[in-house]
């Protein structure tokens, strides 16, 4: 009885890790999409500032992607 309970808990832990990694990827995708969309709006309003906006957009996207990668790695280590 105890062994089956522990195996079920281990399975639920793996399921939770998988769901956590999936949510991290979805959140990063939504965040990067919002960054890109807002940057395009800003460039449309001020075309002369496009280089500064694009630099900041790429830097912010890299930070969001780094956070998502860290979350996925943390979920993978918990499995």
Image (cartoon, rainbow, N blue to C red):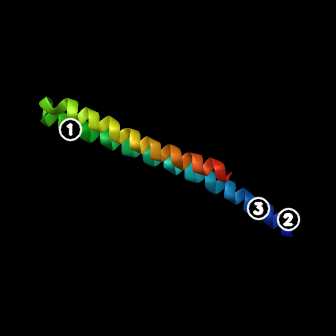
C-alpha separation, residue under disc 3 versus residue under disc 1: 49 Å
- With respect to residue 27, does 48 lie above or below? above
Q: Which residue is mark 2?
A: 3
- With respect to residue 70, does 3 lie above or below? below
Q: Residue at x 40, y 38 (%)?
A: 62
Residue 18 position within the rendered picture, expressed as x and y whole percent measured from the top left: 62, 50
Q: Which residue is mark 3?
A: 8
The first of marks 3 and 2 along the sequence is 2
C-alpha separation, residue under disc 3 versus residue under disc 2: 9 Å
Q: Quick one: 37 or 66, which is closer to the camera?
A: 66
- With respect to residue 13, does 48 lie above or below? above
- Within 10 angstroms of label 1, few (less than 14), some, or many (20 or more) residues? few
Q: Residue at x 19, y 31 (%)?
A: 50
The first of marks 1 and 2 along the sequence is 2
Q: Residue at x 56, y 48 (%)?
A: 21
- Specify whether 13 is left or right of 58: right
Q: Residue at x 85, y 69 (%)?
A: 2
Residue 60 position within the rendered picture, expressed as x and y whole percent measured from the top left: 34, 42
Which structural element holds mark 2?
helix
What label sits on residue 18 in the rendered view?
Answer: none
Residue 49 position within the rendered picture, expressed as x and y whole percent measured from the top left: 15, 33
Which structural element holds mark 1?
helix
Q: Residue furthest bottom?
A: 1
| Discs 1, 2 touching: Cβ within 8 Å | no
The first of marks 3 and 1 along the sequence is 3
Which structural element holds mark 3?
helix
What label sits on residue 41 in the rendered view?
Answer: 1
User: Which quadrant of the structure image shows residue 46?
Assistant: top left
C-alpha separation, residue under disc 1 versus residue under disc 2: 57 Å
């Amino acid at each position: 009885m105890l062994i089956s309970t522990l195996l079920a808990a281990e399975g639920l832990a793996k399921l939770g890790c998988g769901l956590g990694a999936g949510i991290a990827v979805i959140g990063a995708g939504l965040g990067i999409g919002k960054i890109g969309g807002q940057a395009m709006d800003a460039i449309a309003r001020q075309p002369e500032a496009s280089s500064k906006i694009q630099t900041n957009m790429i830097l912010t996207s890299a930070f969001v992607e780094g956070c998502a990668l860290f979350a996925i790695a943390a979920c993978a280590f918990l499995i």
